[in-house]
Amino acid sequence: GGRYAGEILGGAPHGTGEHRIFQSKKNPDHLLYEGEWEYGRKSGYGKVHYTNGQEYRGELVDNEHGGWGCLRYNNGDIYDGEWFKGRRHGQGTLYYQNGNWYDGGWCKDAREGWGVFYWPKIRRKFEGEW
């Protein structure tokens, strides 16, 4: 269950709105969505706040991260880049909380294609195919 406040079309969220989700076994991690809706589905720009402290800001397609967006993980890592069906996919940068970062290609949440991994504390980098 939850509470929705915003624009409606044909009885479903459509336009801009906010959906607060009450935790349940079905939705244990999703707490708040603020953003655009299309025929009852999260689509367009939005912000998703999770109960574990993670926060996503960016595009959503059919209720999932899709397009360009930034996810701040609860361990301090930050991914800023392209998404497809809720996974890191395309070009993006993952900033690790320890100061290292990877900038390059992603496929289904894994590094793939051309990319560069930086270790700034030891002044090293790896550039190449993953």
Image: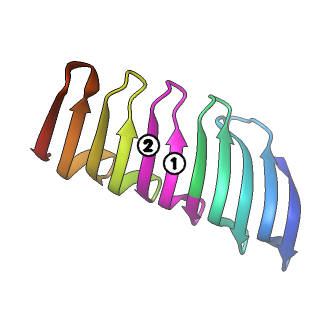
The secondary structure that most of the magenta stretch takes on is strand
Residue 60 lies in the magenta-colored region: yes
Q: To which quarter of the image does residue 29 belong?
A: top right
State the SS at label 1.
strand
Residue 13's spot in the image, x, y percent? 79, 68
- Image side of residue 24 versus residue 122, left or right: right
Q: Residues within 10 Å of mark 1 (few under 14, many from 20)?
A: many
Residue 20's spot in the image, x, y percent? 81, 46
State the SS at label 2.
strand
Whether the residues at callouts 1 and 2 have beta carbons within 8 Å, the answer is yes
Residue bearing the label numbered 2: 79
Residue bearing the label numbered 1: 70
Q: Earlier in the sequence, mark 1 or mark 2?
A: 1
The amino acid type, in three-letter code, at marker 1 is: Cys
Residue 117's spot in the image, x, y percent? 22, 37
Find residue 93 and name its label.
Answer: none
Residue 55's spot in the image, x, y percent? 61, 40
- Image side of residue 123 versus residue 80, left or right: left
Above or below, comparing residue 34 to residue 40 in the picture? above
